Amino acid sequence: MAKKIILFILLAACMVMIFLFSSQNAEISGNLSEGITYRIACIFVQDFKTFSMERQTEIVEGMHFYIRKAAHFSEYALLGLLTFLNACQYFRKTGTRFLITLSLCLLYASADEFHQLFTDGRCGSPVDVMIDFSGAAAGTLFIFVILLIINRIKKFQNTIDK
């Protein structure tokens, strides 16, 4: 029972996190993601801090779009993972787990983009829905494979123990 509650709380927290990010107006959201992009550039672009401000800005602007889309993908990968783990608590059939998980994630991604229509400077994007859904599908597939491997290892250990 505690496992179900913890998984549900984690799922709800993930959904709240996504909602709060989507509630930020365009200026706040842009500044946050540009700051993150700058930090990533500092790590991955050799001698980045030695470049002129113009060149640094150029590099950050070139990376910014991809970092934002990667953020969409990754937060929905987490949503897919947590939704699938929750579905595992209530449904026995793998197909049902996938159907419930992917349907809920697609619905949430669509609702999230609709929500952005009412946020200053933001807009809803069907492309973002697809990126979000792709992230959710990747997260779902990832946790499914991990659980499959764990189950195979347990079965193998049981055959050795006998």
Image (cartoon, rainbow, N blue to C red):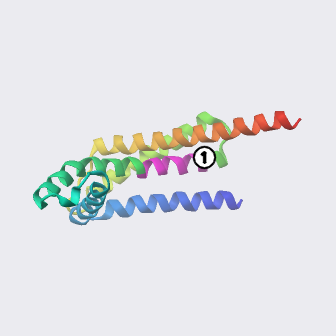
The region drawn magenta spans 75-87
Query: In the image, what residue occupies the spot 21% across and 64% down?
Result: 27
Give the quarter of the figure containing the C terminus: top right
**In front: 107, or 148?**
148
Query: In the image, what residue occupies the spot 29% across and 42% down?
Result: 126
Q: Can you give x and y, in whole percent of width and height, for residue 120 in the image? A: 21, 63
Is 158 displayed left or right of 70 in the figure? right
In the rendered image of this protein, does residue 109 appear above or below residue 51? above
Is 133 displayed left or right of 62 in the figure? right
Quarter occupied by residue 95: top right
Residue placed under numbered mark 1 in the picture: 87
Q: Can you give x and y, in whole percent of width and height, for residue 32 in the image? A: 28, 63
**In front: 88, or 108?**
88
Q: Can you give x and y, in whole percent of width and height, for residue 136 in the image? A: 45, 44
Circle 1 packing at 10 Å, graded few (<14), some (14-19), many (20+), is: many
Q: Residue furthest left?
A: 54
Q: Secondary structure at mark 1?
A: helix
In the rendered image of this protein, does residue 39 appear above or below residue 149? below
Amino acid residing under circle 1: Ala
76 magenta-colored: yes
Query: In the image, what residue occupies the spot 53% across and 57% down?
Result: 11
**Most prominent secondary structure in the magenta stretch?**
helix
